[in-house]
Image (cartoon, rainbow, N blue to C red):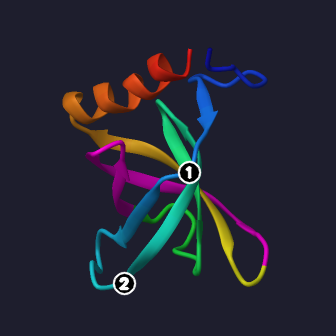
Amino acid sequence: MAELTGTRKFPRIPIEYPLLAELVEEPEEGGFGLTNVVGLGGCSFLANRKFGQNKLLKLTISFSGRVVEAEARVVYENPAEKEKWEIGVEFVKISPFDRYSIESLFHNKE
């Protein structure tokens, strides 16, 4: 079963999926990454660059034969291993279908 960590609003699970992150205001400014945690309210991922705190990103996450798209706000950017950054985002816009797809990850982990 998915675990709740501390006093988080949403459950989250450690899981790795490829993603594309693009700045909403500059779509050509983006890059590929790999999720390390996914939750109902957002995710964190490893990237080769920083995007800027509070910037809006368009995320395209590929998992289990599906693609989820969401608009997300950068909450934090922490240095990670070998010139990479751990980027934490909260979802600000996501379709009901894509939210359901994320919820299905938790049901599959139980």
Q: Residue at x 38, y 63 (%)?
A: 57
Report the magenta stretch's main SS: strand
Coordinates of residue 28 in the picture (x, y in percent):
29, 85
The amino acid type, in three-letter code, at marker 2 is: Glu
Is 40 or 67 nearer to us in this picture? 67
Whether 81 is drawn above or below 54: the answer is below
Coordinates of residue 36 in the picture (x, y in percent):
62, 51
Coordinates of residue 16 in the picture (x, y in percent):
56, 51
Q: Residue at x 79, y 74 (%)?
A: 81
Q: Is residue 81 left or right of residue 24?
A: right
Q: Which mark is residue 46?
A: none
Q: In which quarter of the view is residue 50 placed?
A: bottom right
Secondary-structure class at tag 2: loop
Is 57 or 47 nearer to us in this picture? 47
Q: Residues within 10 Å of mark 2 (few under 14, many from 20)?
A: few
Tell me where the magenta segment starts and ends, as one range. 57-81
**Residue under numbered circle 1:** 16
**Nearest to viewer (mark 1 / mark 2):** 1
Whether 64 is drawn above or below 18: the answer is above
Whether 74 is drawn above or below 39: the answer is below
> Which of the image's four quarters has the C terminus?
top right
Q: Is residue 39 left or right of residue 23?
A: right
The amino acid type, in three-letter code, at marker 1 is: Glu
**Residue under numbered circle 2:** 29
| Alpha-carbon span between mark 1 and mark 2 | 23 Å
Q: Residue at x 43, y 78 (%)?
A: 31
Confirm or deny contact between disc 1 and disc 2 (CB under 8 A). no
Q: Is 67 within the magenta?
A: yes
Is 52 or 60 nearer to us in this picture? 60
Coordinates of residue 108 in the picture (x, y in percent):
46, 21
